[in-house]
Image: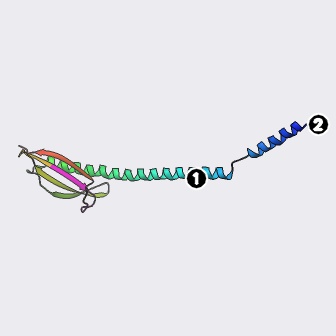
Amino acid sequence: MKTPLNSIIQKNSFKKAKCAKGFTLLEVMLSMAVFAIAGVALLSTANTNIINLNSFEERIIASWVASNQLVEAKLSNQWPPENNEKGSSEISGQVWHWQQQALKTADDNLRQITVEVRIAEADEKSIASLVTFVTRKN
């Protein structure tokens, strides 16, 4: 025999079971929007990292080119070192243009050499610039 209390409990448990079956459309759309925003932020961060990696690679290789030119200037027997010398080097499948400037110092036996490296010879701003000092060999 069914008591009124039993029928109320059965109706309430049926309603709870029916409500607990899944998510509403609003909940699903909201979660999709959250994941979409997170995905866009992740792609933007990845893109920025790739751009920075390419820039970092350019600066590293340009500093190698400048370092190579400074070593050549130090090993050269020419005194004073040639001023405003220009040239190009190929490293990593890319042509790098460099310019060497030799400046006088207070000591006549010492010169400051600066090497600037660019990708295009007409570029105003250099990618890398290194400085060293050379002395007259006796």
Disc number at residue 79? none
Task: Locate the N terminus by quadrant.
Answer: top right
Q: Please count the marks in the image.
A: 2
- Residue highlighted by disc 2: 1
| Residue 109 x %, y % | 6, 45
In the orientation shown, which residue stands out farthest toward the bottom? 122
Lower sequence index among marks 2 and 1 = 2
Which residue sits furthest right? 1
Q: Residues within 10 Å of mark 1 (few under 14, many from 20)?
A: few
Disc number for residue 33: 1
Q: 10 Å neighbourhood of mark 2: few (<14), some, or many (≥20)?
A: few
Question: 41 or 120: nearer the eye?
Answer: 41
Q: Which span is picked out in magenta?
A: 113-123
- Left or right placement of residue 16 versus residue 103 in this view: right
For residue 6, side relative to residue 72 (left or right)? right
Q: Position of residue 104 (x, y in %)?
A: 9, 50
The residue nearer to you, when weighing 87 against 16, is 16
Q: Indicate left or right for 27 with 85 as reference.
A: right
Q: Quadrant of residue 11?
A: top right
Q: Quadrant of the C terminus?
A: top left
Residue toward you, 100 or 18: 18
The residue under the point 37% across, 53% down is 54
